Image: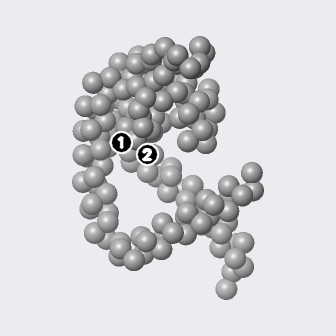
């Protein structure tokens, strides 16, 4: 039997591969929208809590502010988000979705729900519960290392 650290390392590698597969599939699923997986992640963050600042989104996603700013700029060009003055901070604007961005993301979520439902039929719910619990524990342990 492999050592626990070897098993955990393999789980981490598999998680990275899964992330890449899902990003590729998501981009293909939404190719007609012109929205990339990264841009979709920003729209999702705004869907969960809107409005937000670029630093807030970056912190939640554990990426740099600069990376999120590039994605926000791309979404601005597509008129899917807009920026507003932030009375609490002169240099950090507030980002929110436009009506167009909300409508587009709603359609994206509907497509994804159909795909996820199809996948979920192939995986026992108990397996999913254990996987979710395990991933949360790995995240908690990783957070403790900071």
The residue lying at 54 percent from left, 24 percent from top is 70
Q: Residues within 10 Å of mark 2 (few under 14, many from 20)?
A: few
Mark 2 — residue? Answer: 24
Q: Image quarter for residue 16?
A: bottom right
> Which is more toward the observer, 36 or 73?
73
Most foreground residue, 41 or 115: 41
For residue 65, the mark is none
In which image quadrant can residue 42 be found?
top left
* Looking at the image, residue 80 lies above or below residue 4: above
Q: Is residue 130 visible?
A: yes
Task: Using the image, determine if residue 99 lies above or below residue 146.
Answer: above
For the point 35% across and 42% down, the residue is: 28
- Looking at the picture, tell me which residue is in the foreground, 137 or 117: 137
Image coords of residue 74 (percent x, y): 45, 22
Q: Which secondary structure lies at badge 2?
A: helix
Q: Position of residue 140 (x, y in %)?
A: 63, 60
Q: In this view, does 59 lie to the left or right of 51?
A: right
Q: Do the residues labelled 2 and 1 touch (CB within 8 Å)?
A: yes
- Where is the N terminus found, in terms of image quarters? bottom right
Q: Disc 2 and disc 1: Cα gap in Å?
A: 6 Å
Residue at position x 68%, y 55% from top?
A: 143
Image quarter for residue 2?
bottom right
Label drawn at residue 28: 1
- Residue, far right: 145
Whole-percent x and y of residue 79? 35, 18
């Amino acid at each position: 039997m492999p050592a626990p650290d070897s098993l955990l390392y393999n789980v981490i590698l598999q998680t990275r591969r899964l992330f890449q597969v899902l990003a590729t599939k998501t981009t293909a699923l939404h190719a007609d929208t012109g929205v990339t997986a990264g841009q979709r992640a920003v729209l999702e963050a705004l869907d969960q809590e809107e409005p937000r600042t670029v630093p807030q989104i970056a912190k939640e996603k554990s990426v740099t502010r600069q990376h999120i700013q590039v994605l926000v700029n791309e979404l601005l060009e597509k008129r899917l988000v807009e920026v507003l003055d932030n009375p609490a901070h002169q240099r950090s604007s507030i980002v929110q979705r436009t009506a167009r961005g909300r409508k587009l993301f709603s359609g994206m979520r509907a497509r994804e729900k159909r795909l996820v439902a199809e996948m979920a039929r192939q995986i026992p719910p108990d397996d999913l519960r254990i996987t979710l619990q395990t991933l949360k524990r790995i995240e908690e342990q990783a957070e403790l290392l900071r």
